[in-house]
Image (cartoon, helix red, strand yellow):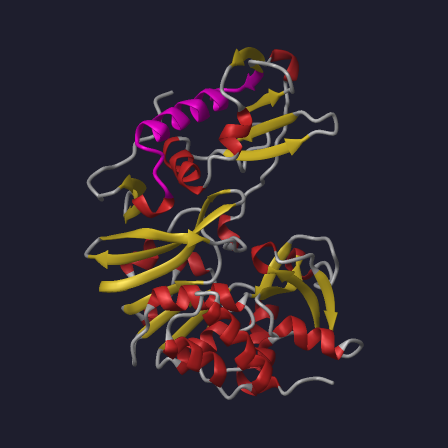
Amino acid sequence: MTANPDVRNRAMTAALRAAGVLTDARVEAAMHAVPRHLFAPDTGWLAPDNGAGPGRAINRHTDPDGWWDAVYSDGSIITQREDGAAPADAPTGTPTSSLSGPGAVAGFLQLLDVRARDRVLEIGTGTGWTAALLTRLGADVTTIEVDPNVADQATANLKAADVAVHLVIGDGARGRPDGGPYDRVHATCAVTAVPYPWVEQTRPGGVIVAPWQPMPGHGWKLRLTVSGPRAVGRFHGAAGYMLLRAHRTVARWNPHHADDAGTARTRLDPRTIHQAGAGFMLAIAARCPRLGMMPMHNDDGSFSLLLFEPGDADGSWATCDWEPGHTDYQVTQYGARRLWDETAAAFAWWVDQGAPGPDRYGLTVTEHGEHLWLDHPATTISPAPP
C-alpha cells in the first residue's frame, strides 16, 4: 500500500537529519510544507545520490509504490535528457534537467541562510521545487530558466503547489538586473566559473551559493560573500550538478597526432594522483586550469590516467600508464601544454603545502576573473609556470 505522502516526507527529512545533512529546523519545516511529490514528474529516472545503488526508471502509473519510494528518497530524478531530444526515463543520454536530491537541496539552502523578505535570484528553475522552498522560507524569489519547456512545467508545478514566484526565461549567466539588487543568489546548476553579473547584482554583504565545477567530474559547494566589486568565500564539500548551459564543454580525451607524441618515464604512480582526493583536485584547478582527468582501469590489470583540455577536442593530451611489477611508468604527451608535467608539479606543490583538504581553499571573484587561494584570500595560488 502507498504510504501517506506526509508520512513519507517526514521519514525522508528524519533520515536526512539523522545523517547530519539536514541541520536547520527552518529548512526542514519548509520541506514539510512544500511536498516534493508536487514537483516530481510522472516518469523519469532515479539517480540515487552518494552512490547509493543503481539508477532506475520510475513511472507513477505502472509502479506507483516504486514512484513514491523514489520521490521521497535522497536521490535526484532526471526530468530531461539531451535538452528534450531523448526520453527522461531512458538509461542513457546526457541529463539536462532534474529534480535535485533532497540532501543536496538542503545543503545549499542551509549555506544560503535566507532571511524573511530577502530578495533571492535563483539560477535554474528546473521543476520549481527549490524556488517553492525559498518562498516558504520567506524570500521574494526571481527564478531564471533557460529552457521554455522546463519553465512551462515548473509554472504548472508551482501553480499546483499554490506558490507564487517571478519566473523568467533567459540565460542565467547574465542574471536579472531588473530585479536587483539581491540579498541572495542561488545557482541550482554548476558553473565552470562564477559569472560576474551575479556579483554586480548582489548587494554588499549578500551571499552567492553555487556548485563550482571548473573541471569535468569534480564540483564543490561554494559560498561567497559580496564586498563591493568582489566576492570572497570558501568551499563546503562536494557537489555534482549539471552545468549551466552557457558553460557546457566537451569532455573527451582524444589522442590525436599520436605518432608525434613525446614519451618519458616517471616514478610518480598515476594511481597516487587519481586517489589523492578533493584537496588535490582543487590544487589542479588552481595550478593547471582547463585540465580534464579521466581514469581507465584496463582489462589486463593495468591503469591509465588520461589528461586532456576540456572543450578542445584537438587540444593537448597526456597519459601515464601504470603496469604491475614496474618501478617506473611510461608518460606520453602531445600538444602545446605538457599536461602530465603540469599535474606532477601541482602534486609536488600540494604535498609541500601539507596536502591541504578542500576546507583550506577559497575563491575570490572580481570583474577581471577569479582565483583560488589557500587559507587566506591574500595567499593566491598561481598557475604553474609553463
Q: Could you say where residue 231 lies in the image, as x and y percent from the top left? A: 26, 53
Taking the image as drawn, is residue 319 in sight? Answer: yes
- Please identify the quadrant where the N terminus is shown: bottom right
Is 335 in the magenta?
Answer: yes
Q: Could you say where residue 104 lies in the image, as x and y percent from the top left? A: 48, 63
Q: Could you say where residue 348 lies in the image, as x and y percent from the top left? A: 38, 24
In the picture shown, does residue 73 fall above or below 244? below
Q: Quadrant of residue 97?
A: bottom right
Is 191 in the magenta?
Answer: no
Q: Nearer the viewer, residue 245 or 51?
A: 51
Q: Quadrant of residue 51?
A: bottom right
Query: Going by the image, does 18 lie left or right of 283?
Result: right
**Magenta-highlighted residues:** 330-357
- Please identify the quadrant where the C terminus is shown: top left
Query: Going by the image, does 232 lie left or right of 165?
Result: left
Q: Nearer the viewer, residue 182 or 90?
A: 90
Q: Could you say where residue 150 lies in the image, as x and y percent from the top left? A: 59, 69
Q: Residue at x 49, y 58 (%)?
A: 189
In the picture shown, does residue 115 fall above or below 259? below
Query: Going by the image, does 86 lie left or right of 140?
Result: right
* Count of marks overlaid on the render: 0
Q: Residue at x 66, y 85 (%)?
A: 3
Query: Going by the image, does 20 lie left or right of 100?
Result: left
Taking the image as drawn, is residue 169 in sight? Answer: no
Q: Nearer the viewer, residue 13 or 383?
A: 13
Query: Seen from this angle, which residue lies furthest right?
Result: 62
In the picture shown, does residue 267 fall above or below 37? above
